[in-house]
Image (cartoon, grey):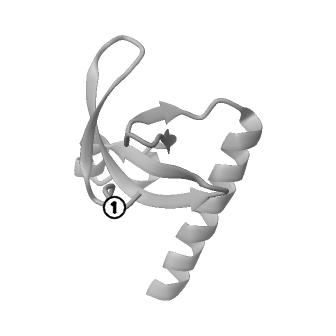
Amino acid sequence: MGNIEVGEIFTITDENDEELEVEVLAALNLEGTDYVAVAFVEDLQEEIEDDIDIFFLKVDQDGDFSAIDSDKEFDKVSAAFDEIMDEDEAEEN
């Protein structure tokens, strides 16, 4: 996953074929699969931290994003990202 960096901005297409810009907030490899946590650039620019929606996406071998298919997989990825965020907050304090 060396080609996807935290802070990079990508354009994704939603279910209504609208293009939206997302920024990579964190990246991790879990059990051999790459994942990224992203948020909409528009939300980040408004700097309303409490209302920022964060999404977790799977990264395939070509670097393309896809949705996480199962609740079990989502819960596992969400917990791993929570751990990373908690560690980052602890280092800042």
In front of the other: 62 or 45: 62
Residue 78 spot, x, y in % from top left: 64, 51
**Is residue 61 shown above or below 13?**
below
Residue where numbered disc 1 is placed: 6
x 22%, y 49%: residue: 45
Badge 1 crowding class, 10 Å Cα cut-off, few under 14, some 14 to 19, many 20 or more, is few
x 49%, y 87%: residue: 91
**Is residue 11 shown above or below 82?**
above
x 73%, y 35%: residue: 71
Residue 60 spot, x, y in % from top left: 47, 40
x 38%, y 36%: residue: 64
**Is residue 59 shown above or below 91?**
above
Instruction: State the count of labels.
Output: 1
Residue 39 spot, x, y in % from top left: 38, 45
Q: Is residue 22 left or right of residue 72?
A: left
Q: Secondary structure at mark 1?
A: loop
* Quarter-of-image position of residue 21: top left
Which residue is most to the top? 16
Residue 88 spot, x, y in % from top left: 50, 77
Can I make out residue 10 in this image?
A: yes
Can I make out residue 93 in this image?
A: no
In front of the other: 4 or 89: 4
Which quarter shows the N terminus?
bottom left
- Identify which amino acid the numbered label 1 is placed on: Val
**Is residue 18 shown above or below 56?**
above
Which residue is most to the front? 61
